[in-house]
Amino acid sequence: LEAKEEFSHKTLAMDVMRPRRSDPPLTVLTQDSMTVEDVEAVVSETTYSGYPVVVSKESQRLVGFVLRRDLIISIETARKKQEGIVSSSLIYFTDHSPPLPPSSPSTLKLRNILDLSPFTVTDQTPMEIVVDIFRKLGLRQCLVTHNGKLLGIITKKDVLKHIAQMANQDPDSILFN
Ligand code: ADP
């Protein structure tokens, strides 16, 4: 095989990431436009270990990554202990609360649980390299971007499944042991 042809057969991050083409879009949170109730709904309707936080649904610019368990604990604690936190309270992950009308309920700042530099790769990154990064950095998940926009996520389990699949199909292709 020519080098170029060989490259075109390689599995890329975009082939392994979720969502798949036919799946519903990635479940994300926005940095300053969702309420306590909105976020609670996301957490109860999905079982993912974490959620990417984006500037806005339209922009899909990545801001960070928040773990499900940290969200649950922080919201529960705020509802019990923080004055004025109600279902319609706005949650923000930014430095400052966005400007709101004076009559708005108290806002809930969750910047302290946001991982501001989650690991990312581009959709064209060969899986061989992604596997290597997971191994070397001990990642739990990695986000996938294209032109700076968030496209998908690859978890450790996704990587392990990919490795198992490669091993089944073609034992010679496991170059990364
Ligand atoms: P695991 O892969 O260990 O089961 P998760 O429960 O977080 O971890 O993810 C389950 C599946 O859903 C994985 O295939 C993963 O790629 C995908 N996934 C993880 N987080 C999200 C998300 N926020 N939105 C959509 N899919 C996700």
Image: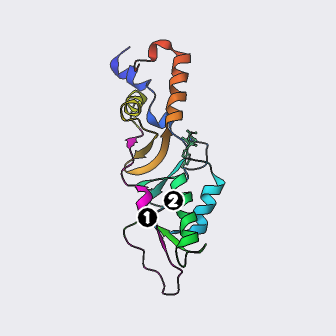
In the rendered image, the vertical position of residue 3 relative to residue 19, given as above or below: above
Which image quarter holds the C terminus? top left
In the rendered image, the vertical position of residue 107 relative to residue 44, given as above or below: below
Q: Residue furthest front?
A: 81
In the rendered image, the vertical position of residue 163 relative to residue 110, given as above or below: above
Which image quarter holds the N terminus? top left
> Which colour assignment does the render follow?
rainbow
- Kindly tell me whether residue 61 is visible in this rendering: no
Mark 2, secondary structure of its residue: strand
Q: Main SS type for the magenta part?
A: loop
Mark 1, secondary structure of its residue: loop
Give the residue pinned by disc 1.
93
Q: Residue at x 45, y 35 (%)?
A: 13
Q: How many marks?
A: 2
What is the x, y in percent for residue 133?
Answer: 37, 33
Q: Residue at x 50, y 24 (%)?
A: 163
What is the x, y in percent for residue 6?
Answer: 39, 20
Q: Is residue 66 magenta?
A: no
What is the x, y in percent for residue 65?
Answer: 45, 52
Give the Cα distance between marks 1 and 2.
10 Å
Q: Is residue 114 magenta?
A: yes
Question: Which range is magenta?
Answer: 96-123
Give the residue pinned by disc 2.
29
